[in-house]
Amino acid sequence: MEKKNKVFIATSLDGYIADRNGGLDWLSSDWLESVPSDDNTGMGYEPFVESIDALVMGRTTFETVVGFGVPWPYKKPVFVLSNTMKEIPDSHKDKAFLVKGELKEVLEHIHEKGYYNLYIDGGTTVSSFLKEGLIDEMILTRIPILLGGGHPLFYELPKRVKFKLLESKVYKNQIVQNHYKVV
Ligand SMILES: NC(=O)c1ccc[n+]([C@@H]2O[C@H](COP(=O)([O-])OP(=O)(O)OC[C@H]3O[C@@H](n4cnc5c(N)ncnc54)[C@H](OP(=O)(O)O)[C@@H]3O)[C@@H](O)[C@H]2O)c1
């Protein structure tokens, strides 16, 4: 079975995935919603999540999504990376599973459960996967705003990682989405 780790994430022009307060308000702000669109795929998000077997996300992203107080948005199992969290809150025990330790061992554990095509989410998490050469594809959606600070998508890496552009789309004549594959 082919194993793949993919990223699907939105960033500001200055490369942040959340503002200084961790907020994603800018993703649903009026200016974005007010641009008419005939796209009904969530800018490619819906087919992307259909294509994956499970998610691996950092503790911060998990806590942010839980904190939204909305119905759980994922239909696939979510593996939460954390070395500090003792256990998944009771409210989410059937949906999310705590994982810790070396990423390669974490991935082996997830593959043994039958999940091979993984959605890797959270900036620190994506960078730690990149550091170990464990990302295969990235779909990056660039929102035309400078946040000026916040949670970056990319941190320092020990060496260059080269990508090939597979596809580029423009949504709402505003938002550029690039699909990259590691060379
Ligand atoms: N724009 C978007 O599309 C988008 C998508 C996802 C998330 N976000 C936002 O981005 C923010 C979170 O991103 P983030 O970069 O701060 O954090 P993150 O990657 O979600 O979480 C980082 C945490 O994961 C845990 N962790 C354990 N092992 C790890 C490992 N090997 N590598 C990396 N993390 C590991 C650590 O928690 P412990 O300290 O518990 O060990 C670490 O502090 C949130 O505000 C979220 O809403 C935005």
Image: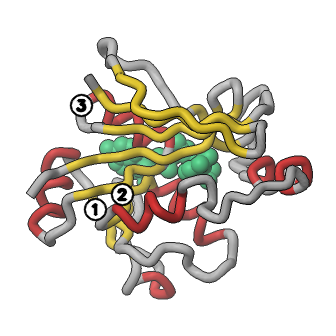
Q: Amino acid at mark 1?
A: Val
**What type is the residue that disc 2 sits on?**
Val
Camera-side residue of 11 and 125:
11
Residue 81 place in picture, x, y as percent = 36, 56
- Mark 1 near mark 2, Cβ–Cβ under 8 Å? yes
Res. 99 mark: 1
Disc 2/disc 3 C-alpha distance (Å): 15 Å
- The front one of 15 and 38 is 38
Crowdedness of circle 1 by 10 Å Cα count: few (<14), some, many (20+)? Answer: many
Q: Quadrant of the N terminus?
A: bottom left
Q: Nearer the viewer, residue 90 or 8?
A: 8
Cα gap from disc 1 to disc 2, whole angstroms: 9 Å
Residues packed near mark 2 inside 10 Å, few (<14), some (14 to 19) or many (20 plus) = many
Above or below: residue 63 compared with residue 179: below
Task: Please name the residue that numbered disc 2 is placed on.
Answer: 56
Q: Residue at x 22, y 46 (%)?
A: 103
Q: Residue 18 at x, y = what percent? A: 67, 43
- The circle on residue 132 is 3
> Which residue is at 73% across, 29% downward?
149
